[in-house]
Image (tube, coloured by chain):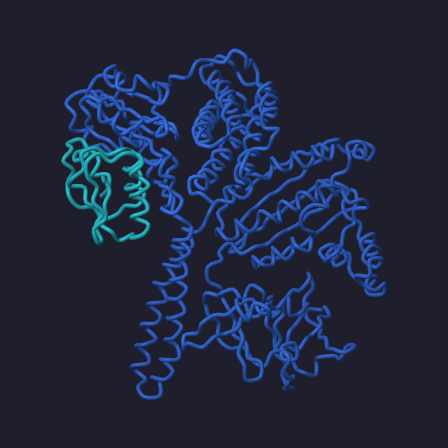
Chain colours: A blue, B cyan
Amino acid sequence: MDELLEQFLIEGRDLIAQGASDFARLARDPGDAAAVDSAFRAIHTLKGSVGIFPMGPAERVLHAAEDVLERARKGRGALDAAAVTGLVACLDAVDRWVDQIEGGALAPDAERLAAEVIAQLPGHAEASAAPVSGEVPDWLAGLAEREWPAIDAAAGPLTAFRYTPDADCFFRGEDPLAIVAEVPELVALAILPASGAWPAQDVIEPFACVSVLEGLSAAPADAVRATFRMMPDQVVLHRLDPAARPEAGLAETAARATAVLRVDAARVDALADGLGELVVAVNAFAPLAEQADKVDRALAATIRTVQANIERVAGDLHRGVSAVRQVPLAATLRRLPRMAREIAGGLGKGVDFDVSGEGLEVDKQIADGLFEPLLHLIRNAIDHGIETPAAREAAGKPAQGSVRLAARRDGDAILVTLEDDGAGIDAARIRAAAVSRGLIGEEAASQLTDTAALRLIFAPGFSTASEVTEVSGRGVGMDAVQASVERLRGTIDITSEPGRGTRFRLRLPANALTTRLLVVEVGSDRYGVALDQIVETVRIDSNALMPVGGGAACVLRGRTVPVLSLAALLGGADAPSPTAKLLVTRSGGERVALKVDGFAERIDTLVRPSSGILAGVPGVTGSTLLGDGGVLLVLDLPALAA
Amino acid sequence: MSVHVEDDVIHLAGRCQAEDAETLLVALQEGPDRIVDLAEVQRMHLAVAQVLLGARPAIRGNPANAFLARHFVNLLQ
């Protein structure tokens, strides 16, 4: 994808999220002046960025929304609930167009939709003139930050200009650089990429103007304006008077603008990879110290001290890099409210969708991977959970259903809860449906607890909708939701009360850089198991294992848990021993114990996803390099125990 | 010939027009390590300037044109 567009997708969606959160504040308190200001800035900036792409309808809609906000800022038109609803509709439309432009072009109905949402805005006909705002625009803050030596050295007032030529001005024979060269008393000049970054060499379009030219002149504003008389609409001017120094706000804005650094995620990933290698390299000290023990105790002790020091520093670094990779969940959650409204609208249902915890920061990988499963769960909740308005009223509920998504931190994990107040899921119906689809035998089904029966909806090929609606017939099934959550090394569980609603709880690691592994021994081989897949490790007397059917089981904390031999699962022979060492994991929501021959050390390491030959091996998630250069296969316990 | 390549040096000379941007871009794509010599430049179109700003090649020589020498070369540092 072209870099300009990529940058726009990131920044445009950020601005949409900002606007959406400001509108949410305005919905609660229409008089919130700070929210009006913030929304105005977001919409104004967004209007500028859509202008670079073939998104005319978006530009018109944003312009109209900006007018409404501008009047509210000037105290000439208070925002009522209808105005806020209209603004939200505008933003939803633009959000949809951003999705479409990502796919290539706006849908044919864009013009019609634009007219529709603009018509929803209050007093739209009296569009005001372009705002002349007294406040410091963002570009000026950046310029002040860049050119402070020139500003400090200036003897008198300066004129700052920002000239944004058309993308196709070269074709008209214009040369913006030649025009700027004519600016009288030019003090400073910067040529900046219009999209925030220069296009990469392989995608740069040499005949498209992708620059913005900003500069300072010691000449009066009128003299500078005269230079741009052929393109007055492409230039913004601002007077700077260093003597008056009304720029406390300016410095503050400038400082804020530079406090945030956008770094290409790939660079951070490379840093994380290198750090993973470092952690692995440090693991090599342990066997070295053991060897040294045989010849020189004191040397071994020194090596262990050195190891501890390097590990401490690597740990600090790791925390630092993890922190850089942490992104607010807002990026993942921001598109969901609009999608929830669209899904509900398409099904003729009213849904109040509420999101909390957007400020929570999680590892980028987790944030990116959460969107699809959450979207599907929301779809599922609105489609199958929330009843039609008529059915709700008959059941004595408010006609509008409620779906709440909440994220919160819980130690090293994040908990994401999606609750609806819909019809709930009837475990008996799930059992019957699973039996009739041949997913499970009648007897086995009757023995399932209600909790376990509900989990059957995650089984591939399961759907309880009596008719496949357009919504549920599209996209992935609940089995894919579970798979994508497990790929993030998370778990998902489900509770439901018929008539009252359903709750899905996702538990995910907040950090995903290095994995803590427990090394286990199976016969003469060693394997790694992610600690977050292990509920507990226990040693029990082999006599306590009871044969059940073709396998074995034991009683742990008053519950019967099936016991599988890891050696047998990996195609080897089970070696009997007086004490059974068990790894307890969860598979499909139920506890399962895997018998191993020994527990070895715990290591922190970078697990590389399976590739090549390994990719086809079930039950292996990846591999890691050991300190001695050996390779350790990392097992996926839930998959092995399934 | 406002853009010509000699070994690993790309010389920009005289009045570099918009159409020279493409020639320069190709020369840089073929040899990303090439040095760009600006000593002979009299005028430079923004299209050419954009390619330099995006590709950030090593630069040598100072343009004869005062405006470029004062306000453009420093942007390539």
Where residue A248 sits in the image (x, y, percent)?
28, 27
The residue shown at (41%, 17%) is A131
Residue A129, quarter of picture: top left
> In the figure, is residue A362 to the left or right of B15?
right
The answer to which of A526 and B68 lies nearer the viewer is: B68
Position in image of residue B6 (x %, y %): 21, 51
**Residue drawn 80% across the image and 44% down it:** A467
Which residue is at 59% across, 27% downward? Answer: A89
Q: Is residue A55 above or below residue B52?
A: above
Q: Which residue is nearer to you in this view: A408 or A460?
A: A460
Drawn side of residue A557 relative to residue A64, left or right: right
Q: What residue occupies the far bottom of the structure in this picture?
A: A295
All told, the count of numbered labels is: 0
Query: Could you say where residue A116 lies in the image, as x and y percent from the top left?
Result: 61, 22
- Which image quadrant is residue A227 in? top left
Residue A200 position (above or below residue B69): below
Q: Is residue A604 above or below residue A570?
A: above
Q: Quadrant of the C terminus of chain A?
A: bottom right
Q: How far from the left and from the top, in percent, is residue A198? A: 35, 41
A9 displayed left or right of B75: right
